[in-house]
Amino acid sequence: MDTTWPSPDSVKEPSTSRLSIPPGTTIGTSYTVKRILGEGGMGAVFLARDEHLARDVAIKVVRPELLARGDLRDRFREEARAMARVSHPNVVQVHTFGEHDGAPYFVMELMPGPTLDQWLSAHGGHPPDLAVARGMLDQICLGVAAIHAARTVHHDLKPGNVLTDGTGRVAVSDLGLALALERAGAARVNGIGGTAAYMPPEVATAQDVPPELARRADVYALGCMAYELFTGSPPFLATSDVALLVQHLTEAPPPPSKRRAGLPPGLDNVILRALEKDPAKRTPTVELLRLGIERAFSGEGEPTRILIAEDEPDFREALEAFLAFHYPMATIDGVADGRAAIDAFDKEAYDLVLLDLQMPVMDGLQLSRQLRDRPAASRTPIVVLTASGGPLDWKELA
């Protein structure tokens, strides 16, 4: 298992290209093409030398055969502008934009290492070293957070769009599907495209999404990438894009700990919440996803699953809202009586229980006894809430 950062020579150079720009060609006034670095759906990326500033750069050029599409030139220009709006070490920097023989191009900083996708492929499906995976994911989250701060949604996050420089730095690139946040709602972003293995359900179904939830498409893709970095494989596996999309739409991913033993106990909940199919239930921001992963690995004692047993609906909803504000990464479930609480706990254990002393079907005392009889709840904190309990109740609870 590789425990080192990607190195520039760990991936072979591409040998052929459908987009031919011979070595020695001058692009613009100062960029001399050396060789091709890679290809994507919109174009190819070339290694070039900036003769004026004596530095190597990467130049992305659109495919000439695609220029007949009226919107492609505008999309390519928008990608350059989207990347130029962000100034952050974990987002690839754009230097300039222009045209070569009628084909749009933009010049960006050179990241000489392999893409994250290439590096993961070199592992052959084996999980990367956890420390390396955490360091990479942390930088990716910082880069995407900077993209969001610039009021832009990436909309095609995947390992192939994450570049490395061989020294430990990671940067997000290829904002080809990015849109300014004020336009990133409803059908404008949906239906544009993306990559099936990392595509959020709302994008796959062209669901209308309010602008305030648009960023959560990137959170979902980051959840998929986090899952892959920590386990060695993405959350869903299939032999076709259609089958992958069906899984994203209909199936619950297995907890990461089922794919790789020894992960921190709280990590499952953090990643699975980022993979919620409903964007309204998903982790709200990249910053909170990053914080949740950090806390899971640091072993901080914040609860990740909270159960509230309270028969008064208004008070139960108020408790849920209060706890959701203070523990934004936690899953919070509310039930109306003790029997429902037992059923919920038996399906999946909680690490904090709040219960009312007086409830129908099963009161707080009975619920406490039954929970303590369960090995999974033997050390779970139980907070009892009541306005009418007396000394005998408290004695029995103690």
Image (cartoon, helix red, strand yellow):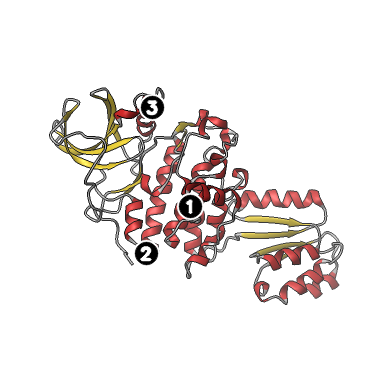
Question: Between marks 2 and 3, how big is the CA–CA gap?
Answer: 40 Å
Q: Secondary structure at mark 3?
A: helix
Q: Say whether residue 73 is left or right of residue 50.
A: right
Residue 224: which numbered mark, if any? 1
The relative height of residue 397 versus residue 327 in the rendered view (above or below) is below
Q: Secondary structure at mark 1?
A: helix
Q: Residue at x 84, y 65 (%)?
A: 389
**For the residue carrying disc 3, how many other residues have a C-alpha within 10 Å: few (<14), some (14-19), or many (20+)?**
some
Front in this rendered view, residue 174 or 216: 174
Residue 10 x/y as whole percent? 24, 56
Quarter of image, res 83: top left
Residue 129: which numbered mark, if any? 2
- In the picture of the structure, the residue carrying the numbered disc 3 is 72
Mark 2 or 3: the one toward you: 3
Whichever of labels 1 and 3 marks the residue nearer the N terminus, that label is 3
**For the residue carrying disc 2, how many other residues have a C-alpha within 10 Å: few (<14), some (14-19), or many (20+)?**
some
Residue 22: which numbered mark, if any? none
Quarter of image, res 119: bottom left
**For the residue carrying disc 1, how many other residues have a C-alpha within 10 Å: few (<14), some (14-19), or many (20+)?**
many
Circle 2: residue type: Asp
Whichever of labels 2 and 3 marks the residue nearer the N terminus, that label is 3
Residue 268 appearing in the image: yes
**Badges 2 and 3: C-beta atoms under 8 Å apart?**
no
The relative height of residue 397 versus residue 160 in the rendered view (above or below) is below
Q: Residue at x 28, y 26 (%)?
A: 103
Residue 201 x/y as whole percent? 56, 44
Whichever of labels 2 and 1 marks the residue nearer the N terminus, that label is 2
Circle 3: residue type: Leu
